[in-house]
């Protein structure tokens, strides 16, 4: 399920406005005024994504009659890699144009690197989710970014980033539940890197992945510095719970991880024409 469609019939009523809220913005739809201002009998309809907060205000008089449909994406093209739900073409072209200009600048990531995009919308991610299967269900800004990167000959992919020490973490190619992990037997970051094949990364543009205490202590050569463009969405965050054994008592330890889009960028010498 990716959204809802609400159809409002032109029955006489006052109030009952539909209020939508998302990322600090708010829209109010007065369907009664809209329908009765038309020259002929009309209905009103509103479609919105499933993570949009919505509220119906009190109907002060009359009767408000609506039909609400849940909108689903049908998996009719199982081999498709491009996201199915995309914003309008103008937004895609604007973002793609800006990205193209950056990639054509020798000053932008001159030695190459990785762009990171926290997902803007909410998704039903669980520990059973196959991360790369989510690509075709990306919506709105997320689908926008994914498709624009593809059009720019980049290779975006979904990743999970596990929080570790302050503003640093470990990136994995899949969703992994750590319920069986024992804090008593091995170091958490060591487990993510050596046992699960993860890569140490920074979670903020103000920190360096290679400056991680764990990376320096173990002299890890494989780490990745990410240039974050958009932040993580708190609602997509997963939490693992494990047992930790201290000197005096047993306690719960929590591990947090979030999905994101990662986009490798080649060095300027390989992408900028001389």
Image (cartoon, grey):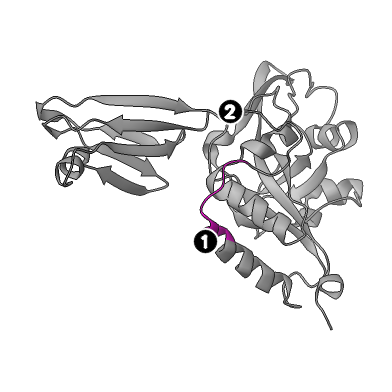
Left/right placement of residue 175 relative to residue 46 reads: right
Q: Which mark is residue 171?
A: none
Image position of 224 with respect to 3: above or below: below
Closer to us: 35 or 147: 35
Residue found at the far front of this picture: 40
Residue 146 seen in render? yes
User: Of marks 2 and 1, which one's residue comes earlier in the chain?
Assistant: 1
Q: Of residues 221 and 238, which is closer to you in this image?
A: 238
Tell me: residue 90, above or below residue 46: below
Q: Which residues are magenta?
A: 84-92
Residue 174, given in percent of the width and then of the height, sits at: 77, 33
Q: Where is residue 48 drawn, in percent x and y?
A: 42, 38
For mark 1, give the secondary structure: helix
Name the residue that disc number 2 marks.
124
Q: Residue at x 84, y 84 (%)?
A: 274
Q: Position of residue 176 (x, y in %)?
A: 75, 27
> 10 Å neighbourhood of mark 2: few (<14), some, or many (≥20)?
few
Is residue 28 covered in magenta? no
At horizontal 35% and vertical 38% (from top left) the residue drawn is: 46
Say if the magenta span includes residue 85. yes
How far is mark 2 from mark 1, CA to CA? 28 Å
Nearest the eye: 9 or 118: 9
87 up-or-down from 267: above or below: above
Q: How many marks?
A: 2
Q: Is residue 204 visible?
A: no
Q: Residue at x 42, y 47 (%)?
A: 23
The residue carrying mark 1 is 90
Which label lies toward us, 2 or 1? 1
- Which element type, helix, strand or loop, lies under badge 2? loop
């Amino acid at each position: 399920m990716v959204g809802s469609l609400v159809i409002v019939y032109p029955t006489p009523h006052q109030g009952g406005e539909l209020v939508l809220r998302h990322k600090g913005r708010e829209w109010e739809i007065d369907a009664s005024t809209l329908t009765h201002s038309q020259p002929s009998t009309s209905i009103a309809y509103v479609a919105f994504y499933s993570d949009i907060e919505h509220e119906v205000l009190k109907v002060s008089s009359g009767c408000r009659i609506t039909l609400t449909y849940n909108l689903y994406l049908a998996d009719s093209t199982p081999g498709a890699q491009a996201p199915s739900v995309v914003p309008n073409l103008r937004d895609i072209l604007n973002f793609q144009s800006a990205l193209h200009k950056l990639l054509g600048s020798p000053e932008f990531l001159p030695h190459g690197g990785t762009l990171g995009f926290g997902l803007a919308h909410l998704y039903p991610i669980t520990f059973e989710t196959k991360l790369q299967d989510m690509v075709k269900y990306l919506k709105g800004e997320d689908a926008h970014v994914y498709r624009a990167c593809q059009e720019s000959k980049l290779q975006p992919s979904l990743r999970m980033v596990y929080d570790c020490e302050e503003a640093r973490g470990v990136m994995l190619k899949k969703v992994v539940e750590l319920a069986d992990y024992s804090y008593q037997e091995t170091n958490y970051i060591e487990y993510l890197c050596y046992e699960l094949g993860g890569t140490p990364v920074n979670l903020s543009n103000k920190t360096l992945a290679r400056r991680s205490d764990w990376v320096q202590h173990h002299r890890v050569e494989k780490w990745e510095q990410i240039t974050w463009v958009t932040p993580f969405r708190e609602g997509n965050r997963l939490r693992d719970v494990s047992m930790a054994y201290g000197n005096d008592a047993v306690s719960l330890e929590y591990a947090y991880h979030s999905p994101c889009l990662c986009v490798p960028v080649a060095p300027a010498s390989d992408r900028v024409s001389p």
